[in-house]
Image (cartoon, rainbow, N blue to C red):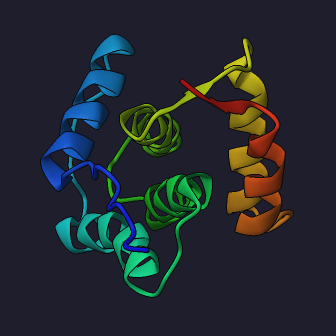
Amino acid sequence: MPRTEPRWLSVEHLIAINKTEVFYTKERYYLREPGLLESAWSKPLNRWDYGETNTICLAVSLLHGIARNHCFEQGNKRTAQTAALIFLRLNGYRWTMPDNQKLGEQILALINREIDESELVDWMSDYVEPI
């Protein structure tokens, strides 16, 4: 049975998300390293190419790439979180946790290597449901 390819965010989408995130906090927008952003963006696409079909896993891969690569001067974790939740929505899922601060705490744990991607996928699975 053929797989249905997910709807991907583009690099331009990620830049727009970051610009929005820093606009609201009056921080300066600055893309520190375009190559690191490209790398973060391509991480879930590579996983897809190698057979990953779990949408939450792909969303966490994108989130991790953005947050870890620190592509932007400001707002990397916020951009990563927003991008992952938009990716889920684009692909037929919604985030049900009312307190996104808890997701932010999990992102920090991921960046600090206190948890790995698979643990974040497992944790998020409790708060993601089909639309």
Tell how many labels.
0
The quarter of the picture where the N terminus appears is bottom left
Task: Compare residues 84 and 105 and report the one nearer the observer.
Answer: 84
| Location of residue 32 by image quarter | bottom left
> Which residue is found at the position 18% from the left and 66% from the top?
34
| Location of residue 110 by image quarter | bottom right
Return the x and y of residue 90 as percentages of the image width and height: 36, 36
Q: Is residue 110 left or right of residue 36?
A: right
Return the x and y of residue 50 as percentages of the image width and height: 45, 87
| Location of residue 36 by image quarter | bottom left
> Which residue is found at the position 62% from the left and 26% from the top?
95
Return the x and y of residue 54 as percentages of the image width and height: 59, 61
Residue at the outermost left position: 12
Q: Is residue 3 above or below residue 123?
A: below
Q: Is residue 48 left or right of residue 72?
A: right
> Which residue is found at the position 39% from the left and 15% from the top?
25
Task: Compare residues 102 and 123 and report the one nearer the observer.
Answer: 123
Return the x and y of residue 55 as percentages of the image width and height: 54, 54
Task: Compare residues 110 and 51 and report the one nearer the observer.
Answer: 51
Q: Is residue 111 left or right of residue 70?
A: right
Q: Is residue 7 left or right of residue 110?
A: left
